[in-house]
Amino acid sequence: MKVSVDVDKCCGAGQCVLAAPDVFDQRDDDGIVILLDAAPPADQHDNVRKAAAVCPAAAIEVHEAGLHGTDLHGTDLHEIGLHEIEVQG
Ligand code: SF4
């Protein structure tokens, strides 16, 4: 899974931080989202999906990893060499 955030869309509501505090944080001054982990481990995937779903600004994009149709749920992407990271802003 890859995660990216659009800071131009973010309105600082902080819903993502509540849903996935290991993956998202907020800037102290204006509350705009900070992406802590653009390739979160499998145990964070559900939280990240929740965060993207509750974000009122639709500022969180989640790219599910798929390797030739293989279900990677529970797979450590670092272990299999997927290091592609996409961060906006
Ligand atoms: S939930 Fe969305 S709008 Fe709110 S801080 Fe997170 S990314 Fe920004």
Image: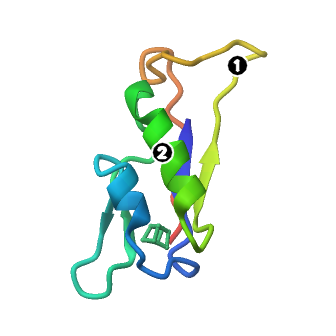
Render colour scheme = rainbow
The relative height of residue 36 versus residue 14 in the rendered view (above or below) is above
Question: In the image, 28: left or right of 54?
Answer: left
Tell me the amino acid under the disc marked 2. Val
Q: Residue furthest bottom?
A: 29
Q: Position of residue 81 (x, y in %)?
A: 50, 21
Q: Which element type, helix, strand or loop, lies under badge 2?
A: helix
Quarter holding residue 55: bottom right
Question: In the rendered image, which residue does mark 2 sit on?
Answer: 48
Q: Are marks 2 and 1 in contact (CB under 8 Å)?
A: no
What residue lies at 28% left-to-right and 76% top-to-bottom? Answer: 27
The amino acid at mark 1 is: Leu
x then y, percent, for residue 22:
29, 46
Alpha-carbon neighbours of circle 1 within 10 Å: few (<14), some, or many (≥20)?
A: few
Residue located farthest toward the left when viewing the structure as drawn: 28
Seen from the viewer's position, the closer of residues 10 and 76 is: 10
Q: Residue at x 44, y 26 (%)?
A: 42
Q: Residue at x 42, y 76 (%)?
A: 13
Can you see residue 21?
yes
**Residue 59, image x, y percentages:** 58, 68
Residue 83 higher or lower than 21, as above or below: above
Is 53 placed left or right of 51 in the picture? right
Q: Marks 2 and 1, how far apart in space?
A: 20 Å
Q: Nearer the viewer, residue 67 or 47?
A: 47
Q: Quadrant of residue 4?
A: bottom right
Q: Quadrant of residue 66?
A: top right
Image check: 51 left or right of 44? right
**Residue, disc 1:** 67
As drawn, the residue found furthest toward the right would be: 69
Q: Work out whether residue 85 can be spotted.
A: no
- Number of numbered callouts drawn: 2
